[in-house]
Amino acid sequence: MTQVEGPVWLLVGEKRGNFPFCNGVIIQDGGVTALVDPGCGASVLEPLAASGRVDLVLNSHTHPDHCSGNHFFSGAEIFIPQTAWASGGSKLKLSERLTEPGELARAWREFVTRSMGFEDFQPTGSFAPGQEIKIGSTILEVVPTPGHTADHCCFWLPQHGMLLSADIDLTSFGPFYGHRESSLVQVRSSVEKVRGLRPRVLVSAHRRPLSQDLDQAMDKYLSVLDQREQRILKLLDQEMSLPEMVEASPIYGGHNSRPALTRYWEGRMIADHLDLLKSQGLIQATPKGYLSNAGIVTSP
Ligand SMILES: [Zn+2]
């Protein structure tokens, strides 16, 4: 555990918090200990759970790399976003929400069990947008930031100018928006909402805390979306179907591991870009799929 500042500590996950794990955040104040996003891996979480110190677990959203360790803290309060209440603690329900019922959902359950040790858990409470959660005298304000998932929230610590930004993680991979409930447009607006808070320190789930050049880091993160769009437009110099675009893989750059799942997610993300490009008049639907409008001259 390393201190970020004041009552806030970083709990570095296995693989340094890279997927399929994350970095947790511990807040200790007034004799209360809260743990945000226990997806850090069993070797990190088991000793903490055995200490019996954690009173409250918070999940920024219900992706398994953020809540796979909830079951270690069954004696503590476990709060999830209100919007995730119907599926929150159930591996089966999450698999069908985040993929498609059937073979894909089965592959997802197998993946999160084997790679993350995800187990069902029982949430004991939920939090709503704008709600203030008090850990001792430290205030965490719930900032809804949908797009990545519908339930994604950040936690704003106004007394410290600190944002726990979860999967607005500012990594070089860029944003993920591969579910039915995800939205490319909302990803952009959520990043802008976070920028508007003007955080002094940003603690994401998959990087070390950032306290310098945050605006540039956010610009760089969003520029990944533009790069993906350009690659998609380039593919559509020739008529192409969505499955063909998934195989060309302009977002993941290949489907070597978990291919059924990454093909599905890439398809969802490409489809989001296609919707946007169509609404901007930059591409058109064709009998086979899609085609760029660049270079097509329409008669006056
Ligand atoms: Zn996530």
Image (cartoon, helix red, strand yellow):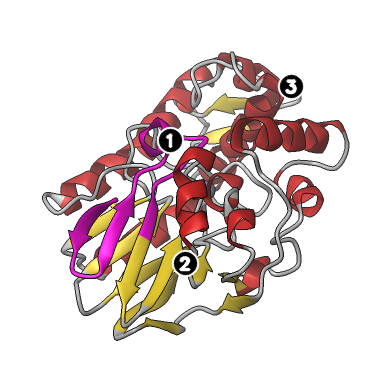
Q: Quadrant of residue 211?
A: bottom left
Q: 289 or 297: nearer the eye?
A: 289
Determine the image quadrant of residue 107: top right
Binning the other alpha carbons within 10 Å of mark 1 as few (below 14), some (14 to 19) or many (20 upward) gives some
How far apart marks 3 and 1 lie (CA) works out to: 45 Å
From this view, report whether residue 27 is shown above or below residue 223.
below
Pick the front one: 62 or 251? 62
Of the two numbered discs 3 and 1 on the same chain, state the one appearing first in sequence.
1
- Amino acid type for the residue under numbered disc 1: Glu
Q: Are marks 3 and 2 in contact (CB under 8 Å)?
A: no
Q: Nearer the viewer, mark 2 or mark 1?
A: 2
- Residue lying at 47% horizontally and 26% vertically, measured from the top left: 233
- Label 3 sits on residue: 288
Q: Which residue type does callout 3 highlight?
A: Lys
- Viewer-nearest of discs 3 and 2: 2
Is residue 2 within the magenta segment?
A: yes
Q: Looking at the rendered structure, which numbered label has been put on residue 180?
A: none
Question: Does residue 97 appear to the left or right of 181 in the view shown?
Answer: right
Do we see residue 35 in this rendering?
A: yes
Q: Could you say which disc has been placed on residue 14 in the image?
A: 1
Q: Helix or strand or loop: what does disc 3 sit on?
A: loop
Find the distance from the CA under tag 2 to the CA under tag 1.
19 Å
Front in this rendered view, residue 227 or 135: 135
Q: Position of residue 278 (x, y in %)?
A: 56, 41
Disc nearer the start of the sequence (2/1): 1
Whole-percent x and y of residue 41? 51, 40
Query: Element type at marker 1?
Result: helix
Disc 3 vs disc 1: which is toward the camera? Answer: 1
Is 188 situated left or right of 121 in this image? left
Which residue is disc 2 drawn over? Answer: 54
